[in-house]
Amino acid sequence: MEFQPYNLSTWIAYQVGRSIRRFLTRAVDRRKTISPSEIAAQSEQRPYINASEIGDFVYCERLWWFSKHGFVSQIPAVVTRLQAGRDFHRVYTQEVQSRSSRRRKTRKFLIAVAILLLLAAIAFLLSNRASATAHGHKSHVVANAKATPKASISKDPPESPGQIVLDVLWSLGFLALVFYVVRRIVRWRRNPGDKGDLVYADDQRSELLTCHELGLAGKPDAIWRKGNRFIPEERKNRRLQPSQAPFENHVLQLIAYCHLVARSYGPVEKGVLSYQNSRHVVPYTEEQYIRLVQTLTRMRSLDAIEAHRNHASRAKCQACAASTICSEALR
């Protein structure tokens, strides 16, 4: 599906990036001597793995196997949970899109106010310079006309109402800009995932991100842009205990989105994992990428055989969606 940008600058950046990516892809393809039939055969032999599958696989390989073959989707409790998750993500998508729209409108309004204040300041300075020049000339003429040894004493004329209004507007505008900058800094420190502009949201218009080299595909909940860096965000409908670290299966799923965003949009240094009561910044490093590749290799090795429980945690089995149909669950 064609990407639908949210503003003109994002559309221009996307079109330029897509053109460069197409040019580089064609240049690389020309160096390769792989025929279209061989590429099609490789695609059939290596189907895409959805990034959402990685979370289930890291949690438990047998849970992933149940989900892949459709056993979990037949459990009524799981169906209800999945529907609640879809509703949660739909509401979150609408929320971030609305917040991004309000932010763009606020930014445009502040830019307009700043331009008006700048014009008012220029007019104020020019008015003061003209007034000072006229007043100095008048004082010089009066001093020469009297020709007395006493120095002529001139008093500054009172400010006009227009100048007072300009002073007040300039002061209020300066305070508003200071308040806006401080508010942005506080928000940046509290919500690292809200940095930058929203360039992607998981809705009906969003495209499926793919990586042919790894056979990976997926759609993150949101992608933010800050400068020339992109930040994918994954949202989870659950809460964490205070000072609790994010779950490893969620982290690796986010790393998969980091890789997809880096291939489709541009440089990625980190991702944001958001829960209902906390947010965590996850660095995208070489070690995380290697772990992602190893996990995908392991998933493909188990694709044609039955996977088994690969942990000894009773708590995992009790919280597992497939515990009622799993013969290997720890009771």
Image: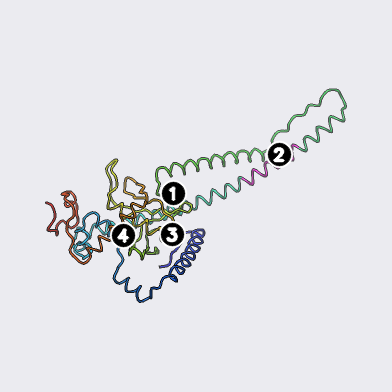
Per the image, the residue denoted by label 1 is 195
Residues under numbered marks 3 and 4 in contact, where contact means CB atoms less than 8 Å apart: no
Asked which quadrant contains residue 203, the reply is bottom left
Mark 1: amino acid? Lys
Give the number of the mark in front: 2 or 3. Answer: 3
Magenta highlight range: 118-132
Residue drawn at (14%, 55%) of the image: 329
Foreground residue among 33 and 125: 33
Main SS, magenta region, reads helix
Q: Earlier in the sequence, mark 1 or mark 2?
A: 2
Residue position for label 2: 128
Task: Identify whether 175 is placed above or below 31.
Answer: above
Q: Is residue 129 magenta?
A: yes
**Picture coordinates of residue 166, whole percent (x, y):** 63, 41
Q: Are marks 1 and 2 in contact (CB under 8 Å)?
A: no
Q: Nearer the viewer, residue 253 or 3?
A: 253
User: Mark 2 or mark 4, which has the lower sequence index?
Assistant: 4
Task: Give residue 267's quadrant in the image.
Answer: bottom left
The part of the image, by quadrant, that contains residue 132 is top right
Q: Which x, y percent locates residue 229?
A: 45, 53
Residue 327 numbered tag: none
Identify the element where label 1 is drawn: loop
Distance from the alpha carbon under mark 1 to that under mark 2: 41 Å
Q: Amino acid at mark 4?
A: Ala
What's under tag 2, amino acid-wise?
Asn
Amino acid carrying label 3: it is: Tyr
Q: Secondary structure at mark 4?
A: helix
Q: Which residue is mark 4?
A: 51
